Structures are given as structure tokens and as C-alpha cells.
Image: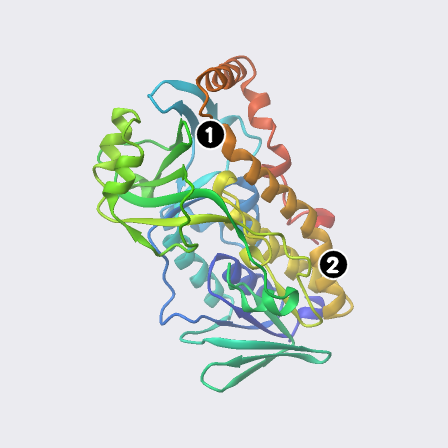
Amino acid sequence: MGMLAGMRATVIGAGIGGLVAARALALRGAHVKVLEQAPEISEVGAGLQLSPNAVAVLRGIGLEDRLLNAGAVQAQEVRLVDYKGGDVVRLDLSRLKDQSYYFMHRADLIAMLEKGARDAGVEIELNARVERIEDRPDGATAFMEDGSERHADLIVGADGLHSKLREVLNGKEEPFFTGQVAWRATIPNTMGRGPEAMVHMGPGRHLVCYPLRGGELVNLVAVQERRGWVEEGWNRRDDPANLRAAFADFAPRVQAMLEKIDDVYLWGLFRHEVAKRWHGQHVAILGDAAHPTLPFMAQGAAMAMEDAWVMAASLSGAESIPVGLALYQERRIKRATRVINTATDNAWKYHLSFPPLRFAAHTVMRIGGTLFPEKMLRQFDWLYTFDVTKGASGGF
């Protein structure tokens, strides 16, 4: 257990990264409290992908075997298709060295992680709204909106895009609009979609769909390039007719899915810089608070989970909290930056608008997928086969 035995740790935010961090710290002997501003721990209706590097963290904290019972769907294939419906390439995920790739409803993952945290002795305080945080040589304090204070040896900011702790460490920063917006929705799986992710690629747009909750639902994420700015955040409702109009020229099977949408949410995609400072003396940030990422590699949750493991492991073997936190940032910043840059650069591949260029690129992908399928999959070995629970990257 090392230095974490008996340490008082406070985690701000009961999202994916916060709950993984809470359990990882508690399993190493820390006394952990999670502060969640909402009146209950809940998540909006959206799916996510758990790639093998994310599942490695769940394995490390003893929760991998709960995935299927929690509604996760084990992915078998990724299909890239032209917006008119023709197959471009199929990637057989059974060829992956580690085949543990899942689709999961975000709310189901949060519920599983919440139980896992409580099982490890973590205390979760709801309606706990933090006003400001103070970092000192002997500890840290969260000053609450109700006038109370929470003192701890360590405060972890897992409080997302608008993190108060990030601002304490780095000052106020302004993200910039990427010129892209995204819609998200879930629909009943009445069309019998199997365990595959399908990416429909069109000029200036793409749509991703995959099953959730044991195949009962289908998750939809649609991205469009546009000049008009849309605010950042996941809870802005939109009229489904706007989404249907934006993708009106896509294949009939896309139209059939869009017709089933009753509720849809729209948000603007903004580029944030990776934070220069992830930690102070007794405070640290992780996940979106440190390095928000665009959704084009489906790695937001995975990066937060990796951060959480590495932070706990770095602290466990360190001589002091400041030394452990410095080691945490050193171990994580290069990988997180690479993932974020890759996600940023990935959008153009789905959105080619010039027909000859789109035809040429799709032809190359078809040939590659047919003749060299393993090579196409292995281009992301650096991402998916990386296991933070082993070796110097953060294991024991």
C-alpha cells in the first residue's frame, strides 16, 4: 500500500475518471471521499467505447468481470462505409492481440464504477458544490458553496471540461471552436444491429453507430462541419429534424435510424490545449480536466481511466505526495498529448468533400483492408495494446 495507507483523499467529480481514481486509491489504503455536485449520480443517455487499454484498467481494479452483467457488448467488427452505403473496409476485431473491446452505455458504466467505489470503502457525498480549492504545503482544502470546508492530504480534480482545479493550476484558458458540431442519441435496436461499430463517411460529415445494453439499443453520434458556433457541453437539446436534414443524402439505412430518434442532443466541438500543470503540492487533475479530447478516437474515457491508475500507482511508490504527483504527470503527458493530437487529425479522414480525393482515399482503405487487414489494425497497437497496469508506466 505504501504511502497511500491512511491518506485522506478527496476526489471532485463522480464521473468515470473520478470513480476509477477513488477505487484505485482506496484499494491501496487511502480513505477516499468523492464530492459530486449533482443530487444523484446519473449519466445522460449516451454510449462509449471501451478499448483494450481501458479494459486493462478495469482489470487492474478488479472490475472487468462485471462488464457483461452491466450490459456491455463485446465488439466484433468495425465497418467503414461510404455515405451512400457501400463498404469501404471491414476491420475484424478478433484479430486484435487483446480482444477485450466493448460498447457500453455511459450510465451503466457509471453505475458499475459507483458500486465498485463503494465496495472499496469510498464515501460519496452528493449535492457537494465546490466553490474554490486551496493548495498548501501541508495539504489541501475544498471550500464549499454552503460555507463548509473539506480538508484532505490530496484533492483530485476529476471535474471535467470546466474544472475549477485546472484553473487554479493553469489560470483561465479559452478553447477554440473546431468548426464541427456533434449530435448524440440512442434508439431501440429494432433493426437487429449486431456487435459492430459502423462509421458512415460523407462530405463534411460522418455518423457512427453501435449497439448498447446487450443489443437492446443503438448509440448514434453524428458530426458535421459548420461555421456556426454551438456551445460546448452535452446537455443542449436539439430538434431531431435538424439532424435528419443535415444527413438527408446519406444511405436509406441511415435514414431509417434517424427516423427513430425522439430526443437528440447537440454540442460544439472545441479544441483545448493540454494543461501545462497537472498538479500542485497536494492537488492534481485528470481526464478532461487535464486534457479534453475530441471524440474521433473514442478515447476520452480510456484516458481518464489510465490517468486514474497511474496517479494512484505513482503515489503509492513515492516518498511524498508532491513527488508522486510529479511522477504521475511525467508518466502521462506524452501519451495523452499523442492521443489528443491523433484524434484531432482523424476527422479529415471521415469528411473528405472533394469526390476524386474521397474516391482515392477510400480505394486505398479498401485495398489495405483486403490485402493487409492486420496491418490496418496494428497501426494503433501503440494505443490499444498499452497496459498502464504493467511496468514502469504505472504498474507495480
* Residue 88: quarter of image: top left
Under mark 1, the amino acid is Tyr
Q: Looking at the rendering, in which quadrant would you find the C terminus?
A: bottom right
Residue, far right: 319
Q: Identify which residue is drawn at 52% across, 69% down.
A: 12
Residue 53 in the image, given as x and y percentages of width and height:
57, 43
Residue 69 in the image, given as x and y percentages of width and height:
37, 49
Answer with left or right where residue 165 lies relative to residue 359: right
Residue 266 in the image, given as x and y percentages of width and height:
35, 49
Q: Disc 2 marks which residue?
A: 327
Whether residue 329 appears in this view of the structure is: yes
Task: Classify mark 1: helix, strand or loop.
Answer: helix
Q: Identify which residue is drawn at 47% across, 20% down.
A: 358
Q: Identify which residue is drawn at 43% across, 54% down.
A: 232
Depth check: give the residue in front, 156 or 348. 348
Disc 1 packing (10 Å; few <14; some 14–19; many ≥20): many
Under mark 2, the amino acid is Leu
Q: Earlier in the sequence, mark 2 or mark 1?
A: 2
Q: Disc 1 marks which residue?
A: 350
Q: Which label lies toward us, 2 or 1?
A: 1
Q: CA distance from mark 2 to mark 1?
A: 37 Å
